[in-house]
Amino acid sequence: MVDILFAGTGASVPSRERSLPCVAIRIKGNVVLFDCGEGSQRQLMMSPFSFMKIRGIFVSHLHGDHFLGIPGLLQTMNMSGRKDKLTLAGPEGFSDAIASLLKMCGGGLNYEIDVKDAKDGDIFTFKGYTIEAFSVDHGIPALGFAFREDDRPGRFDREKAMSLGLQPGPDFSKLQEGKKVEGVDPKDVIGPERKGRVIVYSGDTVPCDRLLNVSKNADVLVHEATYLSKDHKLAKEHLHSTAKDVASLAKDADAALLVVTHMSNRYDDLSVIEEECRSVFPNSIAATDMLMLSVKPRV
């Protein structure tokens, strides 16, 4: 199972309804964060996701609303007895920023942190999935991230195996390990390999070719939609995307689902953003804080 939690969906400053940017993906109990704005740890505490199971924190860029929640979260994990290594990655200057923040906070951590300045094309490998960093366009060093689940084995046809005279237990285990049993080939009872799920996180950006290419056939595209198209001049000035921009990109990428986030507080009613997206790309959702989605494999 792969789940996405939208812990914070606001832009620049928090509001009563929306916390600052933080999107979490959970796979087999482990958690990866994309951005970690102020207050993210409290949002996680109110969710079904365990902050102690976080394996990596990936920051899109060094605007404060996207990473100032990290020091408090690291210290809370420390006080909660964390021992597992934690990977942190962000764009150029990220490692210096984290070092400065931790120095100001005082006190060491009793677990290892591996802090990296990432660049376009860098891949971070975890058990069962990878995270690829890619460049986006926000006027400063900025990244998006692609979560890619490893391909999964085909489905085992238990009934067919038994009809061929094989028994549950060692026979089934050997077949699933790729070994022939009593003349039965694994391909006779195991279906084709299943593609892993792909979730793309845009960070803050104007639409760009690199993001479009990475998003091709994604199961979920999580994209900022800071403005409506009627405010396109503001979007251009601040190097953000409009809802219509994002929907067009999702359509061109043939994504299965678009979820927009990082929406300006100027819009009290998020349905207007969702409607603008759906006018171009019907399978669109405007995320609200604490929305959780289970990602089904694309057929």
Image (cartoon, grey):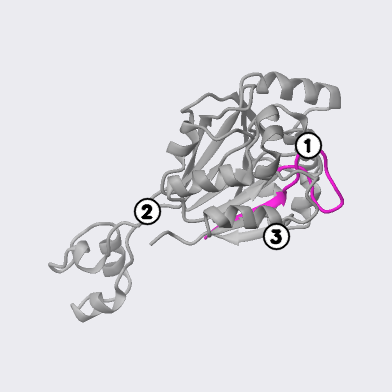
Mark 1 or mark 2, which is nearer the start of the sequence? 1
Above or below for 266 versus 115: below
* Front in this rendered view, residue 86 or 257: 257
| Residue denoted by label 3 | 48
Mark 2 or mark 3, which is nearer the start of the sequence? 3
Residue at point 21% right, 81% down? Answer: 163
At label 2, which amino acid type do we have?
Lys
Above or below for 105 versus 261: above
The mark lying in front, picked from 3 and 2, is: 2
Across and down, in percent, residue 279 comes to: 56, 56
Q: How crowded is mark 3: few (under 14 residues within 10 Å), some or many (20 or more)?
A: few
What is the number of the mark on residue 12? 1
* Front in this rendered view, residue 248 or 117: 248
**Apparent side of residue 18 relative to residue 60 in the rendered image (left or right):** right
Query: What secondary structure is the magenta-colored segment mainly?
Result: loop
Across and down, in percent, residue 225 comes to: 65, 44
| Residue denoted by label 2 | 195
Q: Residues within 10 Å of mark 1 (few under 14, many from 20)?
A: some
Residue at point 51% right, 46% down? Answer: 248
